[in-house]
Image (cartoon, helix red, strand yellow):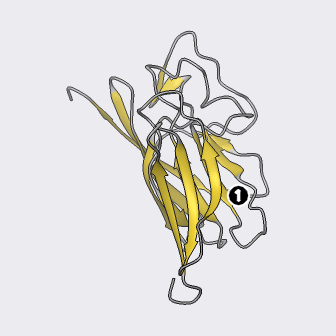
Amino acid sequence: YAANQRLYLHWSDRAGDTRVAEFKGDEPGRELLFVDQPEENHNGGQLAFGPDARLYLGLGDGGGAYDPRATAQDPENLLGKLIAADVDARTPRWEVVLTGLRNPWRFWFDPALGEIWIGDVGQDEVEEIDRVLLELDEPPKNLGWSAFEGTKRIEGHELDRGGDLVWPVATYEHGE
């Protein structure tokens, strides 16, 4: 903001849909992203600039118990993903960076190691912390939701085999 007077906001509108916009001074805002959300919950959380100067957004799977629409494993759907865009482009194009997330409410970039740490909400039993090496020239890595809750297999849910499966580095099981 100090260098270019631009401010970026991520919010859920009155219909519960995801919006990301850029604001600069007195100019009208520029919408960067609109995502239709099927439910009121699991709409994601954080918006932050990454080490590559792109704007990153964690998007939840769109809600509903156990990802009933299988959005987190659908490579054509932005829900259940970590996505990024170059906001300096005339029309920013959002790209999938990681798949298989339930509701990534917080993340942090470790610039020294080129990794990202993500806090992801579980379904019923397991909360997880993920640590992933960002290799942007490789297919998006898969954090496993909704085929797995933490490291526990969920029957009846398929895993997209498009990217390497990455297991959480820490889990918390309810009732432990």
Farthest residue toward the left? 175
**What residue is rendered at 72% in x and 38% in y?**
163
In front of the other: 134 or 29: 29
* Quadrant of the frame with the C terminus: top left
- Which residue is under mark 1? 135
**What residue is rendered at 47% in x and 40% in y?**
43
Q: Quadrant of residue 40?
A: top left
Q: How many marks?
A: 1
Is label 1 in a helix, a strand or a loop? Answer: loop
Say above or below: 46 vs 8: above
In front of the other: 1 or 149: 1
Q: Position of residue 130 (x, y in %)?
A: 48, 47
Q: Quadrant of residue 125?
A: top left
Q: Position of residue 24 (x, y in %)?
A: 57, 77
Q: Amino acid at mark 1?
A: Glu
Q: Position of residue 81 (x, y in %)?
A: 60, 42
Relative to residue 105, is residue 59 drawn left or right? right
Say above or below: 25 vs 38: below
Relative to residue 166, is residue 108 drawn left or right? left
Q: Position of residue 4 (x, y in %)?
A: 59, 86
Say above or below: 24 vs 163: below
Label 1 crowding class (10 Å Cα cut-off): few <14, some 14-19, many 20+? few
**What residue is rendered at 39% in x and 32% in y?**
122
Farthest residue toward the bottom? 3
